[in-house]
Amino acid sequence: MIKSFRGILATGEQETIRLGTVRGEIGYMIRKFQLINKDPRDLAAECIGKIFTVKQDSVTDVIDFSDSTLLAVSYFTNSDNPAYSSDSVIIFDNVKFNQDIYLTMYSDHDDKNCNYYIELEQVKLSLDEATVATLKDMRGSN
């Protein structure tokens, strides 16, 4: 089963996507993560969205693949220069998780809001998988 989430965030904001269950037997994998600015006709837009397994202390434009809590990154840019037309790069880690995830949004333009769309594939976890996924989330490592 696919669960989808969508919304809009301003730069510097963080949103919690509630997924945790009592027994942790339901897991999720990211299948899609897309961004688009609030006004697609705006010719100067840039959005960096990141999904983490733990709440972030701050929201930045830094993308660090060595961060084991980082699950996904989506980057959207729009420009009036034809050489730099609309672009979207999506990268995600193929990890199963069973706890809440945290979405952050960053833009160089403080007045820009970005829409997000996330698809998560719901998977049944064995008791061992549920225990491992929960422990990883509690430790903040993948």
Image (cartoon, grey):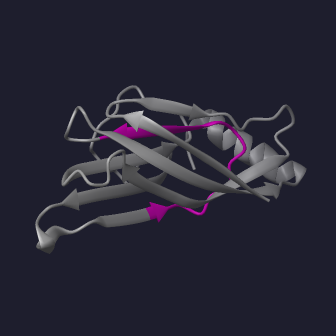
- Judged left or right of residue 135, residue 25 is right
Please name the residue shown 27% across and 45% down the image.
62
Where in the figure is residue 97, as x and y percent of width and height? 68, 48
- Quadrant for the N terminus, please: bottom right
- Judged left or right of residue 55, residue 94 is right
Instruction: Give above or below for 56 relative to 37.
Output: above
In the displayed image of the protein, which residue is found farthest to the front?
41
Where in the figure is residue 132, as x and y percent of width and height? 74, 47
In which quadrant of the rendered view does residue 113 lie? Answer: top left
Work out whether residue 66 can be spotted.
Answer: no
Please name the residue shown 40% across and 56% down the image.
74
Where in the figure is residue 76, as x and y percent of width and height? 32, 57
Work out whether residue 47 can be spotted.
Answer: yes
In the displayed image of the protein, which residue is found farthest to the top?
57
Where in the figure is residue 47, as x and y percent of width and height? 31, 48
In which quadrant of the rendered view does residue 91 lie? Answer: bottom left
Please name the residue shown 14% across and 62% down the image.
80
In the displayed image of the protein, which residue is found farthest to the bottom?
83
Residue 83 part of the magenta-drawn span: no
Residue 95 part of the magenta-drawn span: yes
Please name the residue shown 35% across and 64% down the image.
88
- Judged left or right of residue 102, residue 43 is left
Part of the protein shown in magenta: 91-106
